Image (cartoon, rainbow, N blue to C red):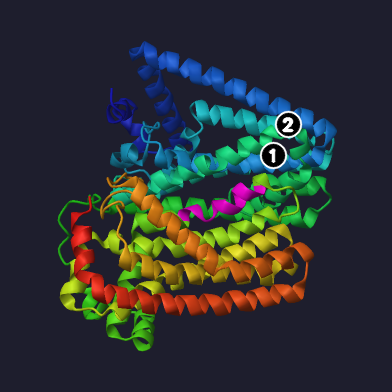
Amino acid sequence: MTATAAAGAVPGERLRAPSPTPTRSVAHLVVSLKLRLMANALTRSVWQLVALAASTTSGLAAVAILLFALGATSRTDPTLAGAWLVVGGAVLVAAWWLVPLVAFGVDSTVSAEVLRPYGLRRRDVVTGLAAAGLVGVPGVLTLLLVLGSTVVWRESPAALMASLPAGVLAVATCVVGSRTWTTLLAPVRSSRRFRDASALSLLVPLAVAVPLVGWAARGPAAWSAVSVERVAEIVSWTPVGTVWAVPSAVADGRPGTAAVHLGLAVGVLLVLVVLWARGLGRASVGPASRSGGGPRPAGTRLRSGLLSGASAARDPLGRLLAAVLGGAAAAVAARSLTYWVRDPRYLGALAVVPFLPLVLALLDRGDGALVLLACPLAAFLVGWTISADVAYDHTAFWVHVAAGVSGRADRLGRAVAATVVGVPVTAVVVLGVVWSTGRWADLPAVAGVTFGVLLTALGLSSVVSARFVYPVPRPGDGPFSSPQGSAVADLTTQAGGWGVLLLLVLPETAVALVAVVRGDLVLGWVACALGLGLGAFWWSAGVRLGAHVLERRAPELLQQVATTR
């Protein structure tokens, strides 16, 4: 029996003519509908019953282990237990929000599409679907986990009382957030770009798993409250973690901070409810989503050629680029900026950047020195991305050759676009890392070497991409597709470029390292000046040399990219 048929089995009069308390009755009907659908599915298939029993048993065992660990930790160190609760609770909320988006095949027996034919009010649909979200193994396990986590605050009556409304808010944030994002992203979930983004999201557990295992293998000495509390303090100010910090702040005697966290948690929930309601409204009246291969709707205007420079002058940034760079270079920069925003091959480098500090924090000794390495590593990832920009263009590179775009305009436009993206990204990483580690005295040295690496990598990449072409994912492919080619030759080219980059950034790196080790602020400013000065020099020199190489090798490059598979 399908979900629609089962919905038809519910008495239609109750849906068409609500009682004086329609919200409660609709919620009751939706929950009853989901229970009936689950029962029908279990009676039809023995294997579904077995799977339900197995998932329930394993889930209950996991909840029991987690609660036992929290209880044991709270007896010896309540502060550490509270920090673990904040981090674990944030992971729980994030899982509720993200798993339904990337894991196709999750339970969607009762959804807005099923209830659409009955003309229910939007408020009733929101309440009914929110209540139905708790029906099932994930909802029951979440309720048990949130209720059992109050054991952490058994020694603090005030924190225990605060944990009850915070727990209700946490469960509501999990369920409502899950429904909100699935509703808003429903039109694009079948698109290639969304699938690429889902694949990129899988980098998160992969990037964290290896250092996390190594950190855990170091034993109890590594499981210090310092590291966990630092992560918990950061997570507590995020939308997924702020609600879990309310009882912790009360237990620490910080009622003002607890009130701020509570207000933020309520605000997050209200924003999610509003977004969900608006998404349901658009879904109930909007047309069916168009797949990537369908025809364009009538009236859709195609953009004119980017190489003409017309599209580069339509917005303020485009006009600024045209005024500073000139028409051809500005057009190339505008097109390159669209790559950084829309192409998953470019976005892959940016997607890794936020997780570098987290990975290094798990391996850090507690003083934050190792976390500082995330800044130049992030700069390298962003700056080295354009070393394959011609290969990423593939046969579209013929437009540059046929239009007679000069090597200077090509190299300058691509380098400027990458700089416009890279400078804010690396600046945020530098400030975030320094703030989280509290090493403000090292800010000049870290900023100098970071921006030195970024600018130097951009300049060197401008030369490498004009001289070498190696197999990369083709346009339209995902960022994780495996192109064919000579792996040894490609690795040799890459390793050679990395070696040259290391030599070029050696001066500012050496001075910055001495400044950080000695805590010398003067040397830190020297490293900052060296990084910015040498980085700007190598950026300019790389663009000029790359332009000269491209002028001579443009036809050969076009032939190479056309034959690369």
357 is within the stretch colored magenta? yes
Residue 399 seen in the current view: yes
Where residue 108 sits, quadrant-wise, is: top left
Q: How many residues crowd mark 2 within 10 Å: few (<14), some (14–19), many (20+)?
A: many
Estimate the x, y position of residue 85 in percent, counting from the top left: 69, 39
| Region in magenta | 351-361
Residue drawn 36% across the image and 55% down it: 345
Percent across and percent down for residue 163 are 72, 40
Nearer to me, 149 or 283: 149
Q: Position of residue 38 (x, y in %)?
A: 40, 22
Residue at x-position 61% and y-position 24%: 62
Which residue occupies the extreme bottom position in the image? 323
Q: Secondary structure at mark 1?
A: helix
Quadrant of res 412: bottom left
Residues 152 and 562: in front is 562
Position of the N terminus by quadrant: top left
How crowded pointer 1 is (Cα within 10 Å; few <14, some 14-19, many 20+) is rated as many
Residue 70 is marked as: 2
- Specify the principal SS of the magenta part: helix
Q: Position of residue 197 (x, y in %)?
A: 39, 49
At 19% across and 73% down in the image, what residue appears? 401
Amino acid type for the residue under numbered disc 1 = Leu
The answer to whether marks 1 and 2 mark residues whose Cβ atoms lie closer than 8 Å is yes
Q: Nearer the viewer, residue 24 or 75?
A: 75
